[in-house]
Image (spheres, rainbow, N blue to C red):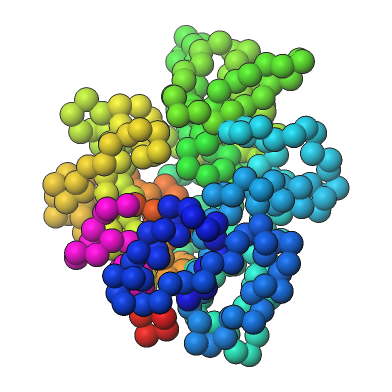
């Protein structure tokens, strides 16, 4: 097995542990930063006897920076300043670099002696473009939150709300990951408005800079909200209708389900007191089986199976859902949604389960 990954990352450690437990030899790791500089590193080992998996480049700051700079070059747009840790900067340029990298990988993997690919680059690319991904799911009959489409800035958002009559929307960076830059926006008829987000606003030299932080903040001043939305829209932003999440105690929850070989497997509720329930924001795991009745669980499994069929070349993927009253909506597909340490399904963790699903190629 060959991994395009960041050596020493939690993902690689967990997958190597799973291989050892199954009596399989350790996977060979090709570092993202090394492959970006020398793509030929993958030519030799990728034959038909090889299992190949792509892990995210974000675990390596140098690989992230390479992709960002490559995207700026492709867009003929200079990188305005050095990237600081946690800064949300030029996400659209990063995606241009990442997209080009996925296209190069697709070409490398298309030879006559092809490796068995766990997650196809073209589908990783599509899942990473969140707006295109939601449109793709909807085209395949998957129920998703209603899309309002691209948001050009604060004034455009206000006009969209007037057109649609909506008072609550989620604003999502088109190329963001996890909850970075996501804004839960709502307004009242008396003119008050709120924007809840994990993006911290820093004003420097007449410019607004955004940083992804673990602490959820609520903005209520128009100048802050407009500055936040304009800064995100400059990197591509879209809006979707707000879906109420089911309640659990003092908070509410959504669900992450890992699909393996096209079927729903590992599932976990993500419990939080605020709008963003992503687990990396110090929210809690909950038992999906205990929270869902039979009708809800059936809806969840049907929706995940349907979403997985829209991505037939993805042997493993994560799907985030809201399930209420026997209906499931898919909020997002995540090409790298299998990092759920310790979560078991039929006795296996996510990495052991996916290796078992394609063990005859390993």
The picture quadrant where one finds residue 278 is: top left
Q: Residue at x 67, y 65 (%)?
A: 35
Where residue 153 appears, x then y in whole percent? 66, 29
Q: Magenta part of the protein: which range? A: 341-358
Left or right, 95 with reference to 190:
right
Q: How many marks?
A: 0
Magenta-span inclusion, residue 345: yes
Left or right, 167 with reference to 31:
left
Q: Nearer the viewer, residue 1 or 119?
A: 1
Magenta-span inclusion, residue 92: no
Where residue 350 appears, x then y in whole percent? 32, 61
Say which quadrant the C terminus sits in. bottom left
- On screen, residue 158 above or below 299: above
Where residue 169 appears, x then y in whole percent? 47, 32
Q: Residue at x 59, y 28 (%)?
A: 211
Q: Residue at x 42, y 47 (%)?
A: 331
Q: Nearer the viewer, residue 30 or 269?
A: 30
Where residue 131 appears, x then y in whole percent? 56, 49
């Amino acid at each position: 097995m060959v991994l395009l990954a960041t050596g020493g990352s939690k993902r690689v450690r967990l997958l190597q542990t799973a291989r050892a437990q199954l009596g399989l030899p350790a996977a060979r790791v090709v570092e993202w930063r090394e492959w970006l500089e020398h793509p030929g590193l993958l030519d030799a080992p990728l034959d038909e006897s090889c299992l190949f998996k792509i892990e995210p480049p974000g675990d390596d700051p140098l690989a992230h920076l390479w992709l960002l700079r490559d995207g700026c070059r492709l867009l003929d747009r200079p990188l305005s300043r050095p990237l600081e840790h946690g800064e949300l900067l030029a996400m659209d340029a990063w995606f241009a670099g990442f997209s080009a990298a996925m296209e190069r990988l697709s070409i490398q993997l298309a030879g006559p002696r092809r490796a068995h690919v766990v997650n196809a680059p073209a589908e990783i690319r599509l899942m990473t473009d969140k707006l295109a991904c939601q449109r793709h799911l909807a085209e395949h009959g998957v129920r998703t939150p209603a899309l309002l489409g691209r948001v050009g800035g604060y004034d455009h958002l206000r006009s969209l709300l007037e057109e649609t009559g909506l008072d609550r929307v989620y604003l999502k960076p088109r190329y963001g990951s996890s909850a970075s830059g996501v804004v839960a926006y709502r307004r009242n008829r008396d003119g008050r408005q709120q924007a809840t987000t994990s993006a911290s606003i820093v004003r420097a030299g007449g410019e607004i800079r955004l940083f992804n932080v673990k602490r959820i903040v609520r903005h209520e001043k128009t100048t802050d909200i407009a500055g936040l939305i304009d800064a995100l829209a400059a990197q591509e932003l879209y809006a979707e209708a707000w879906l109420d999440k089911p309640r659990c105690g003092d908070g509410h929850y959504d669900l992450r389900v890992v699909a393996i070989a096209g079927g729903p497997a590992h599932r976990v509720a993500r419990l939080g007191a605020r709008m963003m329930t992503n687990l990396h924001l110090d929210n809690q795991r909950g038992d999906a089986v205990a929270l869902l009745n039979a009708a809800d669980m059936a809806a969840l499994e049907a929706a995940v199976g349907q979403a997985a069929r829209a991505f037939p070349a993805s042997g493993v993927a994560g799907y985030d859902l809201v399930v209420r009253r026997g209906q499931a909506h898919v909020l997002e597909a995540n090409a790298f949604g299998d990092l759920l340490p310790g979560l078991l399904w039929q006795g296996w963790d996510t990495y052991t389960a996916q290796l078992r699903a394609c063990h005859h190629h390993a």
